[in-house]
Structure formats: C-alpha cells, structure tokens
Amino acid sequence: MTLQQLEYIIAVYRLRHFAKAAEHCGVTQPTLSAMVQKLETELGVKLFERSSQQVVPTQVGRLVVEQAWKVVQRAARIKQIVAEQQHAVAGEFRLGILPTIAPYLLPRFFPDFCRKYPEVEIKAVELKTDDIRRELAKGEIDAAIMVNLNDMDNLEFYPLYQERFYVYVSRHDPLFNHKNIKTADLGNKTLWLLDEGHCFRDQLVKFCNLKGARKSKTTYSLGSIETFMRMVEGGMGITFIPELALWQLSDRQMELVRPFALPEPSREIVLVTGKNYLRKTLVNLLVKEICSCLPEWKKNYTQR
C-alpha cells in the first residue's frame, strides 16, 4: 500500500470517474486503474463498483477512502512542516477564489507572481463560498480568496482590500440619467443577478431589499457578471459590478457605471486558510504580492 494508491482512490471517490481521476492525478487511466486494482487485491476487498455509466464506492470502499484521506492529509502536513522550516517558496499551492473576484483580481497579480516565483505552482480554481469552506476543511485547497463573512472563526484570514458595489445601467433605461442610484429606484426593473449561492448576490439582495428577486419575472439568474454586462451593453436591464472591475472598463463602458446613493454597499476581500495551516511564509508572500498590485486607494486599506 502506497500514498500514491491512496491518492488515486480518493480521486476516484471524489470524481466518480476513472478517466477524470487519472487526469486529476496526472497519470494515464490504465496506470491508475491498475494501481487501484492492485490495492483492492492487497486488501482483499472491492472498493468500487464499476459500470459503463458510473463508478460507485462500495460500503467498505467508503470506509477505506475515509481513512485514506486522513493518511494523505497527515503526509501532506509533514511536507508542509519541512517546507515552512526551510521558508521554501516552492511547490504546489492550491488556491480557491470566488467567481465574482477572479476575473478582476487574478489578471492583476497572477502572471507577475508566476514569473517572479517560477518554483511555486499555483493551481487556482473558482469556487462558491460554501464550496470554499468545504474544500478548506477537507484540505483540498490550501487557501482561498473570498469575502469576509461573520462566521469565519474557524479560519485564519488576511485582509486584502475593501471595495464598493456599482450599478451598471443600460443607456435605454431611465436610470441612465441618474447621477447615483437609490435602492428604491430598482423596483420593477430588469435585473441581471447571479445564481443563488453567490455571496455577491446575497449581499445585494439584502442591501437593496430585493425581496421578490427569487420570484420576479423580470429578474434573471445566470452565472457570470461578464455575461450580464454584455446584456446591459446590448441595451437591456441593469446589473451590479464590484469596484475592482472598473479598472478593466473602456471609457464607453464607464459611461454605464453609476454609484449607489449613501450608504453604499461594499465587501471586504480576504485571503483565508485553515487555522492550523503551516505554510505561513508562502501565504504571507502571496498576500504581499496581491496587495502590491492593487490600485493606490486599495493599498492604503491594507496598511491601516
């Protein structure tokens, strides 16, 4: 029995597919299948029921994977201890990030970070808030960039920046002629909102008192702020964008941006890890590099 075999069965369990598990592990499917079968032979039990349509863990398979996960996590912790003692800036670093942050923050720091620290292999994945919590708890990601929420006592967090929300208004909407937008102005409007489960949506629905957002026929739920922006630019409706998005807009796009009337909704962006995560050197470096790429007014926020 090897750590590699344990990693393989965990991947199969999570992905329910041998080919996807092999791709995730960076090996060929025949190699992964052979290693899993070898482990089954050694243990004398069948870990997965295989069919042409799905892969399902057996009852004993679930128990074995649960223990395998604990073993792999402890082994990873040993590597973290050594890396931190050496203050190593190298190795794989798995970073979760909210979809409402990724398009605006990643391009600002990711390419430069990779060029400056080629020994660090950052694997970034977009995840919703609940998925981030779950993946951090399972050790599937090392850190995440998300919104600072009230119930984060079980996480270690590092402030990055504070940003306001803005309204993005079609030229054909009467609100285009307003200098700022009151929440009361948004009633009976065609609003482009994210799917439920995005904290960006939840904050705006609560702040704007959009009680009918779930049932309204004039409210559309999709998955991308960028998609909504194209719809608004095409002449239909209203959506909301985070402040960091403004730095990517053309002059013509900026004509569609309106601030909220006071009080303005905002969110605090933080990098989080588990309380016991050991690689502080790499985390602190990542925080420093992210903050250094921000606009001046956001840099000041992190220095307060």
Image: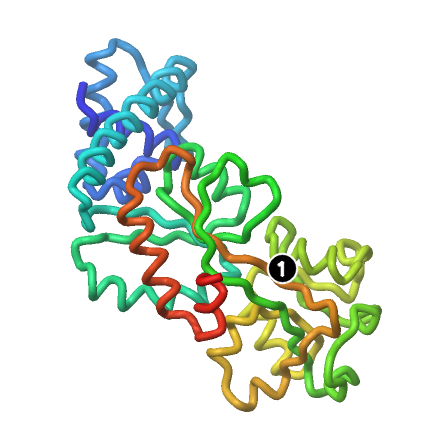
Let me know if residue 16 appears in the view.
no
Asked whether, in this view, residue 200 is left or right of residue 236, the answer is left
The structure residue drawn at horizontal position 69% and vertical position 68%, both measured from the top left corner, is 264
The structure residue drawn at horizontal position 66% and vertical position 71%, both measured from the top left corner, is 239
Q: Tag 1: residue type?
A: Leu
Q: Give coordinates of residue 78: x percent, y percent.
A: 22, 29
Q: Residues within 10 Å of mark 1 (few under 14, many from 20)?
A: many
Asked whether, in this view, residue 40 is left or right of residue 48, the answer is left
Q: Give coordinates of residue 227: x percent, y percent.
A: 56, 70
Residue 299 higher or lower than 151, as above or below? below
- Residue 41's image quarter? top left
Q: Which of 300 and 249 is in front in this view?
A: 300
Q: Give coordinates of residue 253: x percent, y percent.
A: 56, 85
- Residue 25's image quarter? top left
Residue 261 higher or lower than 48, as above or below? below
Q: Nearer the viewer, residue 288 or 140?
A: 288
Secondary structure under the numbered disc 1 in the rendered image: strand
Asked whether, in this view, residue 137 is left or right of residue 172, the answer is left
- Residue 87's image quarter? top left
The structure residue drawn at horizontal position 57% and vertical position 60%, both measured from the top left corner, is 223
Residue 141 higher or lower than 8, as above or below? below
